[in-house]
Amino acid sequence: MKHIYKNIIIILFFISLKTYSQTQEAILYFKDGNPIEGFASLKNNKIKFKISADDKADTWDYENVSKIKFIGFDIVQTYEYVKLSRSDDPKLLELVVEGEVNLYRMEKEQIFTDPTITKKTAVSPHGSNAINGYAYQTEQYRELFYVKRKKDQYPTYINSGVFSNWKKTTTNFFADCDALVKRIKDNKLGFNQINEIVEFYNDICLGE
């Protein structure tokens, strides 16, 4: 039973990663504040948007657009263009928690090729095994998290991994809230609870 449950969770995870590569109902927000409703999808840090389902989609990016909201049956998912550093162009990040401190998430695709296959020159478009002269490739997705105060110019990267320095980074960022820092140091809130950490800060720490 546990094995079946684990497989279901894995399947749902990868479905969620691909959701907005498909056209969905959405609201596009321009930098001047004007919104427009239509249908959109995301690809390569750009937004494909059209007014009606039958229209041809136009391509938009951070030059004119600030964010986009995808509207589902029971969920609204927001993506914002956020500049990660002085030298980088703004990236589309999912807004997970909104408040005085915003929490953003970005999915980073990683492609791995079997290092033992050295004589293959062609790569299968489906990431298949080494059959008919194709090299073996696999795709993995890694979640990257960022926190940003409204006054901050750039967000702070939270490296949420078991062997990372996420605890030091997180406690430094939220150093003005002793109660939250203590919970993190006492392992009452872990790296897989970054949502709860940001919500705790916005709701409890700033409410004190």
Image (cartoon, rainbow, N blue to C red):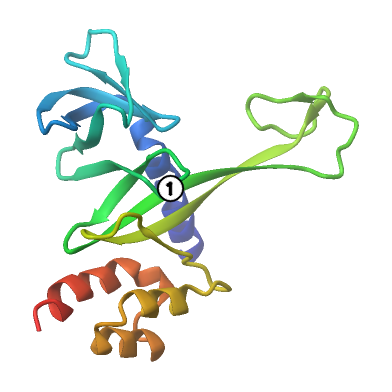
Tell which residue pokes out farthest to the front in this image.
86
For the residue pair 85 and 17, the one nearer the viewer reads as 85
Would residue 187 be visible to someone looking at this image? no
Q: How many marks?
A: 1
Q: Is residue 128 above or below residue 188?
A: above
Q: Which residue is mark 1?
A: 86
For the residue pair 2 and 162, the one nearer the viewer reads as 162
Q: Is residue 77 above or below residue 53?
A: below
Please name the residue shown 22% across and 60% down the image: 151
Based on the displayed image, in which of its 4 quarters is residue 182 positioned?
Answer: bottom left
Residue 115 percent location from the top left of the image: 82, 44
Image quadrant occupied by the C terminus? bottom left
- 139 displayed left or right of 8: right
The three-letter amino acid code for the residue at tag 1 is: Arg
For the residue pair 17 and 155, the one nearer the viewer reads as 155
Residue 28 percent location from the top left of the image: 19, 29
Residue 180 percent location from the top left of the image: 27, 84
Q: Residues within 10 Å of mark 1 (few under 14, many from 20)?
A: few
Would residue 82 be visible to someone looking at this image? yes
Question: Which type of secondary structure does the marked residue at label 1 adopt?
Answer: loop
Please name the residue shown 39% across and 74% down the image: 170
- 129 displayed left or right of 51: right
Please name the residue shown 28% across and 59% down the image: 152
- 24 displayed left or right of 4: left
Please name the residue shown 23% across and 43% down the image: 78
Based on the displayed image, in which of its 4 quarters is residue 187 positioned?
Answer: bottom left
For the residue pair 183 and 99, the one nearer the viewer reads as 99
